[in-house]
Amino acid sequence: MNVRYNLLKKKNTSYILLCISYDGKRLQTSINEKIESNKWSKLKQRVKSSCSEAFNINSYLDKIETIAKNIYYQCKMEGYSPTTDRLKEMIFTKLNGGNKKLSFYEFVEEYTEISNKMRLLKDHTNM
């Protein structure tokens, strides 16, 4: 898994993009943070330390990276590779402080998906 940050330039201000590549998949999404392009270190992929907002934004970027890696490796330990949409959802759910409440149908769908994976894993280990 590789986590990087890039800028999406819009005049003088740029959006910070989260770029994750894993298992042949690529996720690229905005983290809803803006920075002036001249305050960004392309090499370090962080805000330059001379910027007053550097510590807070860079800490936030570190937190996102840690969360993304933890989620990815947890999924791998559970025996699957998350889709890019699912990984994005899980990262932002964790960032926003908790679990998303599922509707009944979402719960049934997720339960069925996990049950099928567990059945396949059980069948595979019994061979």
Image (spheres, rainbow, N blue to C red):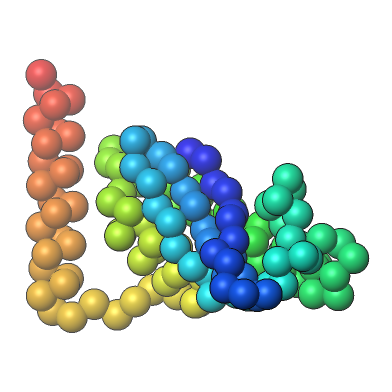
Vertical comparison of 71 with 12: above or below: above
Of 76 and 121, nearer the camera is 76
Left or right side of 12 for 95: left
Left or right side of 18 for 102: left
Vertical comparison of 74 with 48: above or below: above
Q: Quadrant of residue 6?
A: bottom right
Asked whether residue 64 appears in the rendered view, the answer is no
Left or right side of 51 for 89: left
Of 123 and 63, nearer the camera is 63
Instruction: Report the residue at 85% width, 70% height from top.
Output: 51
Asked whether residue 88 appears in the rendered view, the answer is yes
Instruction: Report the residue at 10% width, 47% height from top.
Output: 116
x, y (%) of residue 47?
A: 75, 62
Instruction: Report the residue at 44% width, 63% height from top.
Output: 29
Count the marks: how many?
0
x, y (%) of residue 73?
A: 44, 42
Vertical comparison of 25 with 19: above or below: above
Q: Residue furthest right?
A: 50
Quarter containing the C terminus: top left
Of 113 and 22, nearer the camera is 22
Vertical comparison of 103 with 88: above or below: below
Q: Quadrant of residue 64?
A: bottom right
x, y (%) of residue 4?
A: 57, 49
Instruction: Report the residue at 72% width, 57% height from top.
Output: 46
Q: Residue furthest top?
A: 127
